[in-house]
């Protein structure tokens, strides 16, 4: 029998529903259960691949090529669950499936409707995943009264009826309202949110109350009264020093025991000793290392979320606090760019530089200039995805005599197209889900720095001799016609696809740490399994 935990939002969004779901997953995993995670999003896109980073942050990529919500990154980092594109259920995906079935004749002589056809499709999607694990945690996007999501709320209601109360558990995340002028804490919005759930036939089994500080007992009792819940089922979601401390705070309040007893009529209890030790290392490291994050969306932290978390993981591995300094690359495109960059590096005490991914023309010249500076000044440096390509352009301009070298993504008429569209991408018309996605193998040369980094910091990453798997998301590649010219002028093509055509990694000779990858290593880093490329960058920066 499937065991399902549903996590819903009330009143407003961005309360930390994802961290609630991920933290419950961590606690139950530490109690000995196998866990899977699902997110149901109300938007009409089939996946998150075409959405704006300004509105939704980064796009997370799974091993099977799913372009999905950034919340899945937290799920994988907290629970170590092996998630796929099937774990992301959007309204667009559901309706696409239903309409395709209708066209194929699956509903002949029926009137296709939200109930039962759409709801049954969602149930089938959930069932195909939930049958494989002890517990499946399902986060519902949006708030309970959003016009976009009633089909997901109805699915919850029906699944409680189908599976019975003992096999379903509803967690409702709500904010306490603080009135700054009077200092009062108000519960009325929470009460209305619970009423809204009850109107559609759902009563929460537990409340997680987002609050900046611990609540007084009388407020807990009031929420218990109006929520129809025992006081021990009012969990305080207080602000924490780190998101990784949330499972510890929740576990101290007994949420794991409550859920275990509800779903399994027993409580194994979570062993979070190792997790606590990692959190202590994260928050109380004896040293500090400053890494500049040079990008185009640096004012929006969610746009580079996995990269920033990966740097923190590397700090935990090396017992140093990684302080991240944002650099907006468009600021370093003028004639005075070298002086401005030198001033910033000196003023902020920057030890190393990382440039995350993202597409488009804005900020590219700034990134090329920063790359040139890092080459000359021997500053530890890591580039990801598109910025491997700009590192190649910088090298071609500075060291190969190709001052007009460029990418056809930005300048399609360049005489020296160091970067061009991959051949199998040239006839593609649809933009959604058509990039080079998935986890792909690459062959590392033993004599390279990148091989040494993997071998030293995480040898388990090798699937077989000299081969590692990394996730990807791109359409352009380093032009094979220029491979030899790049090599002849000091660039090491240290990681190629098995057919030797696609450059997956580059590095510079006689540089302490200048690596770039076409892949997305940030999607595989975890608090207790820091990705070796980030560990290598932080270590080189510490030794600078």
Image (cartoon, rainbow, N blue to C red):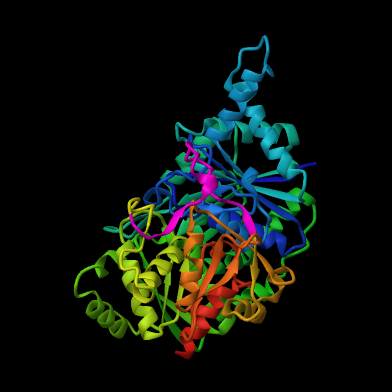
Q: Is residue 263 left or right of residue 539?
A: right
Q: Quadrant of the C terminus?
A: bottom left
- The outermost residue toward the left is 335
Question: Looking at the picture, how far across and down is residue 362, in whole percent?
Answer: 30, 57
Is residue 164 or residue 187 the one in the foreground? 164
Is residue 452 or residue 354 the one in the foreground? 452
Q: Is residue 101 above or below residue 187?
A: above
Magenta includes 435? yes
- The outermost residue toward the top is 109
Question: Looking at the picture, how far across and down is residue 159, in whole percent?
Answer: 68, 34
Magenta includes 227? no
Q: Residue at x 48, y 76 (%)?
A: 488
Question: Looking at the picture, how far across and down is residue 344, in whole percent?
Answer: 28, 79
Question: Looking at the picture, how far across and down is residue 512, in whole percent?
Answer: 48, 85
Q: Is residue 322 left or right of residue 204?
A: left
Dividing the picture into quarters, in which one does residue 248 lie? bottom right
Q: Quadrant of the N terminus?
A: top right
Dividing the picture into quarters, in which one does residue 489 lie? bottom left
Residue 242 in view in this figure: no
Magenta residues span 414-440
Q: Is residue 457 above or below residue 105?
A: below
Is residue 418 or residue 57 the one in the foreground? 418
Q: Residue at x 51, y 61 (%)?
A: 480
């Amino acid at each position: 029998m499937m065991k399902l935990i549903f996590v819903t939002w009330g009143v407003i969004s961005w309360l930390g529903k994802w961290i609630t779901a991920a933290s419950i997953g961590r606690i139950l995993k530490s109690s000995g259960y196998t866990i899977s995670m699902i997110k149901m999003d109300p938007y009409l896109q089939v996946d998150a691949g075409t959405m704006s980073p300004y509105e939704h942050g980064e796009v997370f990529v799974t091993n099977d090529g799913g372009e999905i919500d950034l919340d899945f990154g937290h799920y994988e980092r907290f629970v170590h669950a092996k998630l796929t594109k099937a774990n992301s259920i959007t309204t667009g995906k559901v309706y696409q499936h239903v309409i395709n079935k209708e066209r194929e004749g699956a509903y002949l002589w029926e009137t296709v409707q939200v109930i039962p056809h759409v709801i049954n499709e969602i149930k089938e999607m959930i069932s195909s995943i939930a049958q494989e694990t002890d517990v499946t945690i399902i986060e519902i996007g949006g708030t309970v009264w959003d016009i976009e999501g009633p089909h997901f709320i109805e699915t919850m209601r029906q699944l409680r009826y189908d599976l019975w109360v003992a096999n379903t558990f509803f967690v409702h995340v709500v904010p306490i309202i603080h009135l700054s002028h009077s200092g009062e804490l108000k519960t009325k919005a929470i009460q209305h949110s619970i009423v809204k759930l009850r109107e559609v036939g759902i009563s929460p089994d537990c409340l997680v109350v987002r609050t900046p500080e611990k609540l007084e007992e009388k407020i807990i009792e009031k929420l218990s009264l109006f929520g129809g819940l025992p006081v021990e089922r009012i969990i305080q979601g207080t602000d924490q020093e780190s998101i990784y401390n949330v499972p510890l705070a929740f576990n101290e309040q007994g949420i794991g025991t409550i859920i275990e007893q509800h779903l399994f009529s027993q409580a194994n209890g979570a062993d979070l000793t190792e997790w606590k030790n990692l959190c202590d290392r994260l928050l109380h490291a004896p040293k500090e290392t400053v890494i500049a994050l040079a990008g185009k969306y640096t004012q929006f932290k969610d746009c580079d979320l996995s990269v920033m978390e990966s740097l923190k993981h590397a700090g935990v591995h090396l017992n140093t606090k990684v302080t991240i300094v944002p650099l907006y690359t468009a600021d370093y495109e003028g004639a005075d760019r070298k002086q401005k960059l030198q001033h910033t590096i000196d003023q902020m005490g920057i030890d190393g530089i990382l440039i995350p991914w993202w597409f488009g023309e804005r900020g590219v010249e700034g990134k090329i200039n920063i790359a040139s500076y890092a080459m000359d000044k021997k500053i530890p440096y890591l580039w990801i995805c598109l910025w491997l390509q700009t590192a190649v352009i910088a090298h071609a301009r500075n060291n190969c005599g190709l001052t007009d070298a460029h990418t056809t993504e930005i300048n399609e008429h360049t005489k020296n197209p160091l970067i061009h569209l991959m051949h199998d991408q040239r006839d593609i018309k649809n933009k959604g889900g058509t990039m080079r996605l998935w986890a792909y193998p690459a062959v590392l040369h033993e004599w390279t720095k990148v091989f040494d980094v993997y071998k030293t910091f995480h040898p388990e990453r090798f699937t077989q001799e000299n081969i590692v798997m990394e996730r990807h998301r791109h359409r352009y590649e380093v032009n094979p016609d220029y491979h030899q010219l790049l090599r002849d002028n000091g660039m090491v093509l240290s990681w190629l696809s098995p057919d030797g055509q696609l450059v997956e990694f580059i590095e510079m000779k006689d540089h302490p740490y200048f690596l770039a990858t076409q892949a997305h290593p940030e999607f595989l880093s975890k608090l207790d399994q820091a990705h070796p490329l980030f560990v290598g960058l932080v270590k080189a920066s510490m030794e600078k």
